[in-house]
Image: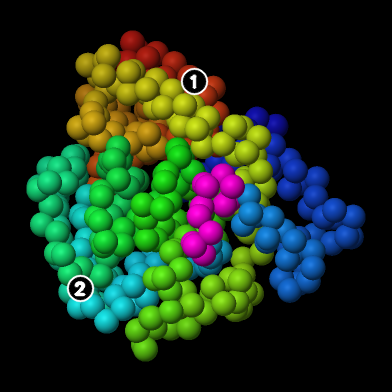
Amino acid sequence: MTRKYNFSAGPAMLPQPVLEQAQAELLDWNGTGQSVMEMSHRGKEFMSIAETAEADLREVMNIPDNYKVLFLQGGATSQFAAIPLNLLRGKEGADYVNTGIWSTKAITEASRYCLVNVVSNSESSHFTSIQNYEEWNINPDAAYLHYTPNETIAGVEFPWVPDTGEIPLVADMSSNILSRPVDVSEFGLIYAGAQKNIGPAGLTIVIVREDLIGDAMDITPTMLNYDVHAKNGSMYNTPSTYAWYLAGLIFKWLKQQGGLEQMEILNRRKAAMLYDCIDNSDFYSNPVDKEYRSLMNVPFTLANSELNEKFLTEAATRDLVYLKGHKSVGGMRASIYNAMPEQGVIELVDMMKSFETKYG
Ligand SMILES: *Cc1c(COP(=O)(O)O)cnc(C)c1O
């Protein structure tokens, strides 16, 4: 069997040792004679899996005790509604930063529940840059400020965290959570769909400061209410048990790799290899401001877009797959999350160079 290097934006690759462990435990977890998939979520076996996963995530991200960690469903997209419903707390509006397609979706959904003040909008630059914080039009009475630290589609990432003072900072970290250390105490709420850098699809993680919980709007659906999930240990209804278990195996794997400091070193190395290849060629290009280039999602175009199909075909013959770019950007996109081995990037760069020599 050859495992392919999968550059998809999500669902993305999972570390092979984790898949092997899941395979070894598939029929019989820890001598229980059951698959994790078959266990009651309220039984002591699954409870221990769930608690260990949370403890390991807390350790890996150094999450302070006054934050709840929720293991939910519905994807990051459900959180676009849950956030205003839970965090407005009697206020009229919230601040949103528009740095790309995911920010825009969050804004559209939040606008159904509150007045959205767009503090900064980089649409006119086709989302290839980020405006300086000093120029943002902050409303001091905003219930919170929402931003997207990594825009998965255009490949734009914040190298800094906005300092919003008393205004709770809310971050959609779907595509860069666990890719580098963050100081959780700078945030009111962090959320992420799992299928990019946490585990399989079907799990959504919300890390929320306790004082922001408990004042949801009356119309909030029970399943979007953080207080309900916090009080029930994320088991108000049946959680996504198998995805929770796999995420737990990933957290252990991250600890074995040396934690997020090591991940950042590796992620910087992988991204630098790709950007160097792009910048040192007249054939490939990436339009994002160098300062704001994403470590996780690297879009690039070919000088001649008629070669796109040929590029994808040649890449596939080398087991490099899912490189087609998002339709709004065109060209290619290489998503290189934690589980993409360095070797995968080396082989992609090698393929890009020989393709350029042949057709460039
Ligand atoms: C993928 C993605 C989403 C959507 O996540 P779902 O889990 O599919 O709802 C939201 N925000 C960002 C930044 C993403 O990359």
Depth check, mark 1 against mark 2: the one in front is 2
Q: Secondary structure at mark 2?
A: strand
Q: Tell me: residue 262, above or below residue 106.
A: above
Quadrant position of residue 137: bottom left
Q: Which range of residues does the magenta coloring cover?
A: 57-68
Q: Residue furthest top?
A: 357
Front residue of 284 and 147: 147
User: What residue did someone put label 2 on?
Assistant: 93
Please say whether residue 261 is visible from this viewpoint: yes
* Rendered residue at 84%/62% (across/down): 34
- Quadrant location of the N terminus in the rendered image: top right
Front residue of 1 and 130: 130
Whole-percent x, y for residue 235 in the image: 62, 74
Front residue of 174 and 334: 174
User: What residue did someone put label 1 on?
Assistant: 347
Residue 192 among those drawn in magenta: no
Whole-percent x, y for residue 345 in the image: 47, 24
Q: How many marks?
A: 2
Determine contact: label 1, label 2, CB under 8 Å. no
Does label 1 or label 2 sit earlier along the sequence? Answer: 2
Identify residue type, mark 2.
Answer: Gly
Identify residue type, mark 1.
Answer: Glu
Say few, some or many: other residues with alpha carbon within 10 Å of mark 1 (under 14 / 14 to 19 / 20 or more).
Answer: some
Residue 59 among those drawn in magenta: yes
* Rendered residue at 55%/41% (across/down): 13
* Rendered residue at 60%/76% (across/down): 232
Q: Tell me: residue 260, above or below residue 87.
A: above
Q: Secondary structure at mark 1?
A: helix
